[in-house]
Amino acid sequence: MRAYRGHLIHIGGSPRLDSAREHLVSVPDGVLVVNDAGSIAYSGSYQEMPAYPDTEMHDCRPGFLLPGFIDTHIHYPQTHCIDSYGGGQLLDWLQHCIFPAEAKLADRDYARDVARDFCRRRVAVGTTTALVFGSAFPDAQDTLFEESARIGLRTISGRGIQTVGPEAAGPLLTDDDTAIALTHSEIDRWHNAEGGLVKVAVVPRFALSVTGRTLHALGELYDAVRGRGVYFHTHLSENVTEIDAVRTTYGVENYLDTYDGRFDGGGLSLLGPRSVFAHAVHCTDGELNRLSETGSSIAHCPTSQLFLGSGTMPWRRTVASGVNVALGTDVSAGDEWLIPRVLNDCFKVHISEPGGQGLSISPAALLFTATLAGARALQMEDRIGNLDVGKEADFVVIDPRCQPLLSELLTPIAPDDADRLLFTLLLSMREDAVGGVYVRGRLLSPR
Ligand code: GUN
Ligand code: ZN
């Protein structure tokens, strides 16, 4: 057994967003005991810790122990194109910056470098679990899964499927039959590999990168593999020009209909409890209700929405529908890898919402969105997302001494003033403060 002493902060139990505050657990002199299987055997006050023979004690004070961050939307093949210049908004940016950059992963050696950098960055920022938009190239996907497994991260990913697009997308396109065959093969080889740390998603890039025929075929494919715990991941209603193009191309009223089999030639729905839709900035109430009733989740990506000028997801209306809202960096449209930096933008954009809709999201709700909501979106809440006993020990140690001024900001706050402490910690921390990153109790090293 190993024990980690520090200030524990997490959202205990299994609340919904609106009761995250009542489930905020803050134990100033706390300890996390991790058994040899990598699960949490004890989580609570140091004084009340039962005696465990042969326990190795790691004193992380004055550090904080938080659940590992969960990024529900990040693009692996965009690791090297953050802050791409001259892109403009979504459709132009894809064409001018992103498709050419992603095409470079056809080169296996280059893809290996990108996979290494991607996994290293995740360790550096404490993202223990991520739902990863993959490369079009199967070799590049193999490299990602291998590298993630070597380091010990939790990764769900799938090859980015594109069957139509502008000239710049040419190297990323396949025909429908090839897309289906490659997706099947990826699922068979990687889903639940590496002791379950690696899983696979079916990932059409967005409605405009595929055709009605492709989506029809993906509906059949997904229906056949849903029962194996495979995921579905894509983009939804990010940008108004994109939405207009989807409506025209598919002859639908609502963007979501394209993924829901509700268009001419449609078929089976791709929605469900392991389906995660990135953005959902401009959804109608009907779309939000449909996401909610099918148990689908939204990956909210405010940093990216700022960079691409996509707009602001209406927080109150979105969460009022009951849909689960998790967080995504959306690297590289999002230029921050650290989930708390995305929380910082999340706080700012929603307090600034116009029309009387602005609100000050509570620190507990922010932490919930970055951890437990992500676990729920990935149907992994029984294993990760907080520091409850019995969960697998995915956690980060945040050491305020490693970041200039962070100790000075935190030390004056009374240790039992959990709201104030958590707010300052989440909004102020940078990756320098990430002192240790653990998955299933194993300390990850970015090498
Ligand atoms: N929509 C389709 N592809 C992309 C992408 O790579 N990034 C973002 N933000 N939106 C997309
Ligand atoms: Zn994205």
Image (tube, grey):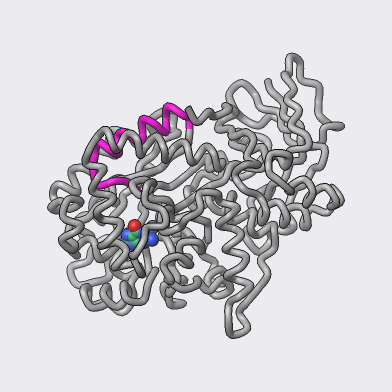
Where residue 409 appears, x then y in whole percent?
78, 52
Residue 134 falls within the magenta-colored stretch: yes
- The range drawn in magenta is 133-152
Residue 57 visible at all: yes
Indicate the quadrant where residue 212 lies: bottom left
Residue 399 lies, with reference to residue 208, above or below; the image says: above
Indicate the quadrant where residue 170 lies: bottom left
User: Which quarter holds ligand 1?
Assistant: bottom left
Which residue is farthest bottom?
A: 355
Where residue 95 appears, x then y in whole percent?
25, 62
Where residue 260 appears, x then y in whole percent?
32, 65
Q: In the image, 239: left or right of 388? A: left
Dominant SS of magenta comes to helix
Q: In the image, 201: left or right of 400? A: left
Q: Residue at x 50, y 72 (%)?
A: 312
Residue 293 visible at all: no
